[in-house]
Structure formats: C-alpha cells, structure tokens
Image (cartoon, coloured by chain):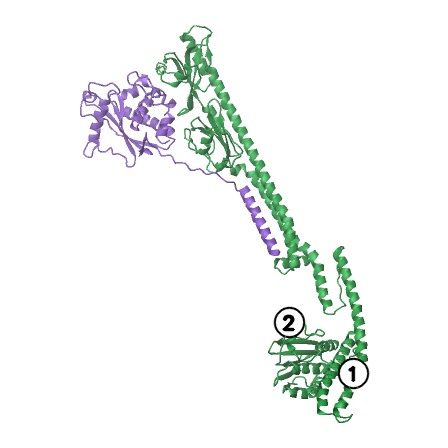
Chain colours: A green, B purple
Amino acid sequence: MHILKSLGKYLFGYGSRLRNKLTLLFILVAVVPILFLSTFSLYLINVSHKYDISALELQTLGQEREEIGKFFSDTLGILELQVVYDKKAEIEKTQAAFLLDNILKANPSFLEVSFINLNGREILKLEKNTTSTATSTLLFDVSKLPRYTVPLGGQEYISETYETLSGPMVTLASPVYNSKGEVIEIISADVLLTKVALSIKNTLIGSTGSTILLDQSGRVISSGGQNILKPGDDLSNRQRIKELLAGRELNALSLDDTYMGYSVKEAVVGAGVRVPKVNWMLLAEWPLSDANATLNDVRYQAFLFTFLCILAVLLMAPIFSHQITAPVEELEMTTKEVEKGNFGVGVKIRTDDELEGLGNAFNHMVGGLKKLEELRNELIYIVTHELRSPVTAIRGYLSLITEGMGGEVSKEMKDLMVPLSESSDHLVQLINDLLEVARSEAGRLEIRMEAVSLPEVIHGSAEELHSLASQKRITVQYDERGVEGIKVAADPMRVKQVIVNLISNAIKYGKVKGFIRIRHEVTADMVTTYITDDGLGMSAEDQKHLFEKFYRSSKVGKIIGTGLGLFITKELVEKMGGTITCVSKEGEGTTFGVGLRRG
Amino acid sequence: MTKYLAIIFIALLSAALWINYKTSVPWVYTEIYAPQSVHAYNNPEQLLNNIHVRFVYFVPKNKTPVDGGTWRELADSELRKLIAFHELQFHELSNITYEIYPSAVIGLEDNIYYDTAFTNDGNPEALKNISNEIAMRMSTDGDLSLIKPKEGAYNVTYILYEGVGASAGGNVALISRKFLTMPEYELVSSSLFAHEFYHTLGLADDYQKQTDISTSEDIMGLGRFRDINRVFIDPLKLKQFGL
C-alpha cells in the first residue's frame, strides 16, 4: 500500500519537489549507464555479426573460386600437349584422333575438340555424343578466330562464356609444342560449364544466401537465389559489378555492401571477389532476413532486458527517493507544529543513518524548547499575576480621580485623564488576557462544566455589550429558535467569556450601522452558535493565523486589540470539549461558529 | 532543475532509441539503373518484345511441292528450336510467335524467274523476287490476304523455298528446303534456319563472302555450321539488342 501510494504520488505529480528531483536523479544515474551499455553492446554485437557474415561469405566465395580454378586446371591442363619429336610437323592423323578421343573421354565437360594447323585450318575434329559423320567432315578455316590467333602466339586462350541450349560454354585453346618448344599445331575445345554452374546454383549461405558467377564482362554465368537472374543477363551496369570490374574486392563490411539483391528481391549483405586467370567474378548475396535472424533474436532479448531494467528503475526510483524524503517531510511537518507552539510533538525516524541522528537531535531540541516555553509561561503568569493588583489599583484610583472623589477636576485635567484611563484599561485587558493565556498554557485554567442555557448567556452578553454596539449603531439580532429548553455542557462563566469575546470582536470590526446576527444550529449531539457580522471580513491568509497568539491582521489599522482574544476563545472552547470555526470573506463579513456538546 | 533533468533524460532516451534503431534497421544501398529494352540490332526505335513470324512454303510454278505434312512438320520443328534458342539468348525478354500458312504457296512464275542466272551468295535475287510477289499477294485483295501481320509485334516473313539459296533482308528471310532436309546439313540445319532469321533482326554475316572464312564463332559466323544446341549470339551483339 505504501509502495502504491508512493508510486501514485510520483506518477501523478503529488510528490515533493525534492522527491521528484531525487527520483529523476536516480533514473538518470541508473538509466543512462543502462542505455549506454545496451546501445554499446548492441553496437558490438552488430559489428561482430557483420564480421562473421563477411568471413562466412568470403570463405564460401573462396571455396567456389578454388573449385573454378581446379576446373580450369583440369581442362586447360589436358590441352597442354607437347610431342616428343623435334620436327615442326603436324601430329600424325591416327595419333591425333587417338588423342582427341582420349581428351573427350577424360573430362565429361569437353563437348568438342579439334586440331588446327598452323594455317588456321581445322584438320581433325571430334564431338561428344555424335555418331553422325556429317559434322566431323565439316572442317573450317578458323584463321580469323581468336582460338587460333591467340595460341599461335604461344598463349592459352579462354573465350568469353556463352549461353547455349546445352548450357554455359567456353572455348579453350592451347598451342601444341614439339620437343624444341615450337608451336606445331593448335588444340581447341568447347567446354561445358554445367558443373561449375550447378555448383554455384547449389551453394547456400545460411538458409537462403546464394552466390552469383559472372564472366569477365559482367554477364551472369550462373546464379542461385530466386531464379531472378538468367544466364547471360548483363549486370555490368550495376554498381557492385562495376566495382569488381574495377578490381575492388567487396568484403561485406562497408555501408554499400548492404543493398537490394540482384538474385533475390530483398535487401542483402554481399561480398564479391575476382576469379584469377579467367577474370570472372563471384558475388555472394545473403538476405538480411536470414543473415540477421539470430542477431534479431539477440537484439530482441537485449531490448527486453534493457526495457525491464528501465522499468525496474522507474518503479524503484520513487521508492528509494521516498525513503530519503519521507524523514525530511516528517521533520518539515513536525517543525510546522512546533512553529505553532505545539511542543508535545516529535519525529520517529528509524533509518539508522544521519537522518535518524538528525531526527533525534530535533526531538531533543523540541524537548528543550518545551521546557523553555514552560518557563516562559510560568514567568508570564507570575509577572501578570503580580502586575494585575497594582494595575487594577491604578485604574481604580484613576476612576476615583476622574469622578472627582479627590476634589474638583478641571476640564483640561479631565481631557488629559481620558487617554490615561484608556491606556490603563488596555493594560488591564492585556494583563488579563496574558494571565488567561498563561493559565491555559500552564494548565491552571479551571473549567467547571454544567448544563448551560445558551439564550441566557447570549442575552446576558448582548446586554453587557449593548452600549458598545449602540456607539456604532450596530443592530444585534438574536434568533433563539431551536434551542428552547436545550442546554449545553459548558462552564457558564467561560462560555459567556467566549460569546462576549466574539460579539465584541464583531462590534469592534463591524461597520457603523451594521448588524450582528446570532443563531443556533442543533444536532443530536451538538449545538452550534453562529455569530455573523457584516464587517471587514478576513483574507484567506489571515484566516490561517486567526487563532494564533498575538496575530493581528494588518488591515485592522488603529483598532485596539491584544491579538490574544481569539486564541483564548479557542482554548476555552476546546477545553470545554467544543469546536470553533470561522468563515469569512474580505469586505463582506465573518461568521464564527462555536459548537458545544449538548448537556 | 527537475525540468532540465527531464529534458536530459528525454534527450538521452531519444538518442539511445535512435542508435538502437540505426543498429537494428540497416541502411540499404539502392541503385538506379536503366531497365533493359529489347530492340532491333542497333535500332532502339524498333522494339522486339514481340516478334511474329509468318511462315510460307513457296514453290515456283514449275516445281512440285513436297508432301504437306512433311514441310509443315519441318517448319514447326525448326520454328520451335528457333524459339528455344531465341528465348535463351534474349533472356526471355523477347517473345516469338508464329503462324504457318497451311498450304504451299505456288509461285506465279517458274524458278528461273525468281532465281535469275545468278544464285551465288545465298540467292538474293530469289529473296527479292519472291518477297515482292508474296507482299503483293498478301495485300488486301491478294490470294494470301489471310496471313495478316500481328498488331503490336515486329512481323517477319519466313519463306521456305522449294529452290536454292538462303538469304534475308529487311524483315524477310528465305531458306531452301534442301538446307533443312539434306543429310549433310542434318546437325546444322536449325542453326542455318536461325542464322537467316537473325538477319531480319538486323545482324549481318560474320564471314567473308569470297573465302567463306568466318570472323566470329557465333551464329552469324562459324556458329551457323554448328549444332543449334551449341550455338550462341555474341554477347557484344546482344548488347546492341539492348540486352
């Protein structure tokens, strides 16, 4: 419940400013490292994952590259022929036929092999899977073709790849040397690349990653993926192929290596390498959805953990801050009580730290203040008690002098005696009030409870104050309906003191020609007497301090008063087990309500 | 103070969310490239997405046509092989349809009129004379008016000639039936058939007329004498087709 209350205060903004500050500070101090660590760890995971992808793709491409290299070693290697004789003459036809037949059998990728003489004329040709003699007789002059011109210069020839209905093919040609190293013939072969193409098509990276093989001009030889690319498709205008053609290796680490795939219709992370000797290009494309599948799981878990940590901090921060601010708040509240003169209070702080020490010191201080207050009250009581007799005597004698008991008093003398008499009255009032307060605070106020008839008290009080009200021509209206025969439990002298005090205040602060209305409200237990005037009224701030000792509103001006009347009234009412309330509006008047238990 | 802490907190949270977003949603490089448009060789104006072949078996008046079933099967077989080859070379971006005129078209003249005295270099005179006659007969009031060009397609007329020669020009190709039926051309007949067809798309011969020496390995050169299953169109030429 305490936690919920604390959380509620935090969430709905009712917390103290210090608590809000501490809560935010806690959140900031706890959440910032969490967010930082979370972000940094995600970054590291990303980087590490990126390097893993790069390594895997480059490894796959390396294997493919090796396979292609081996394919050409196997095919071109077979075509490397050197005869044992040293004359510069063509190989004898029977031997040539035997050689071509063996070459065709040696590697299933060979489709056609032929010997070309130094004039560029095909002299013997064999084709695989052909029983017809029709084409074997078709021997042509190939002197204008690179499969003749290149090897004639002593170099191996590898043509561009081309797409045929049998599959991707390439033409290879190699010079045939005699024992002296002289070129005596050219051997040429049409080689099917199906084996290489299938290997590329079947290569998988992860679950859906694929590879693409392109020839030296950027045309697709074979591709895995979603069959988007077809053999022969020209990708030379694509950025990544341009980069590969320019000799740059793509390692799947740079920003551009994440792109919309060529072999799949989604974003991929890709690497690319060149294949030496044939200058082909190999490209790996791994869809991000697959490549990052595990990473997404890790990321989700990291996010979840971070979220839970932040949530925990958000929930715990108000509780922690409350632990710190609660004793401070208790100190603040208790201090306000002490400020009001209530020295019987204390704080109960059990935090086992400096705050508990502060609380104990505070309690000691309040104890000390209480003793001082008691001493002060005692002093006031004694002083006022001792002053009362001489001051009363002074007033009495002044009265006698004014009345001429000591001889005739001149008019000037009488005029001078007026303020002296008024000051004497005020002094007596002040001493009486102080004595009353001192009695009350020293616990010497005697209350004799008995059944009291309120109308009697009110009539008596009104009678007593009649002349005062008449001076200001204030009408006092008393509505005693509802209290006939009903009595209240009170001290008759004290309740009269209360009513007189309230009516005299109403007269004192009332308007000239104003009114005072007195009425009762009776319930089963209580009788509340309301005294309403149409006087000055009070501000909300004044009402807060109304019953404090010596408090006087700045708006009362030169109206004489001690500031103790309402304090004493409240003390008396409460000592009689009653309550006193006040409702006032500045400029409109005031209503005091005195509630007493029925007797 | 509280306000500033709140602002700092929101800023940090936003920054963290932004970084997390950036690390979880990768930047994807998108490139812009021109889409492929298949067109006639070196002629981007003439699109080749759809090619329609109107096939005609043409017999001079003084010659006897072979059995109807035989030449139609032959034509159908060669056209199907051509389509398979074309789809592969053109990456299925160019589509060939065909229509075979159901009966032999008997010429208005004897073969000597079409062939003239000179039949070398693939008999270009026959191509010219026959294509003129067929064009005339295919016109609205001609007897071949039923063979209509296909709307929205590049229309090619392919003539199977009961005579000599193999030639092509404009959008008309001609090939002697002998090239498709004689045993010595058995394995290369389809390549020869395709060779003449690709002239109608703008490709020139890749061999020297006088010496017959080929200057390329593809279907326009030495490839015309190879099995269609092992023939290709040079990638550089494909580029000129927009591929």
* Other residues around mark 2 within 10 Å, as few (<14) / some (14–19) / many (≥20): few
Labels 1 & 2 near each other (Cβ < 8 A): no
Please state the horizontal and vertical placement of residue A431, each as a whole percent of the image: 76, 79
The correct choice, above or below, for A259 with respect to A559 in the image is above
Residue B238: numbered disc: none
Secondary structure found at label 1: helix
Please state the horizontal and vertical placement of residue A20, each as a whole percent of the image: 64, 57
Dot 1 or dot 2: first in sequence order is 1
Position of A453 with respect to A265 (left or right) is right
Q: Can residue A78 be seen in this view?
A: yes
Please state the horizontal and vertical placement of residue A40, each as a whole percent of the image: 60, 42
Q: What's the residue type where badge 2 is placed?
A: Glu
| Real-space CA distance between mark 1 and mark 2, rounded to the nearest whole angstrom | 36 Å
Q: Is residue A4 visible?
A: no
Please state the horizontal and vertical placement of residue A358, each as a whole percent of the image: 75, 59
The image quadrant that residue A466 belongs to is: bottom right
> Of the residues tagged 1 and 2, which is closer to the observer?
1
- Front one among A306 and A408: A408
**Can marks 1 and 2 be said to lie on one chain?**
yes
Q: Name the residue under label 1.
A: A391
Q: Residue furthest bottom?
A: A408
The residue positioned 75% from the left and 66% from the top of the image is: A345
The correct choice, above or below, for A344 with respect to A578 in the image is above
Secondary structure found at label 2: helix
Quadrant showing the C terminus of chain A: bottom right
Position of A61 with respect to A487 (left or right) is left
Quadrant showing the N terminus of chain A: bottom right
Q: Mark 2 points at which residue?
A: A541
Q: Tell me the chain of label 1.
A: A
Q: Tell me the chain of label 2.
A: A
The image quadrant that residue B174 belongs to is: top left
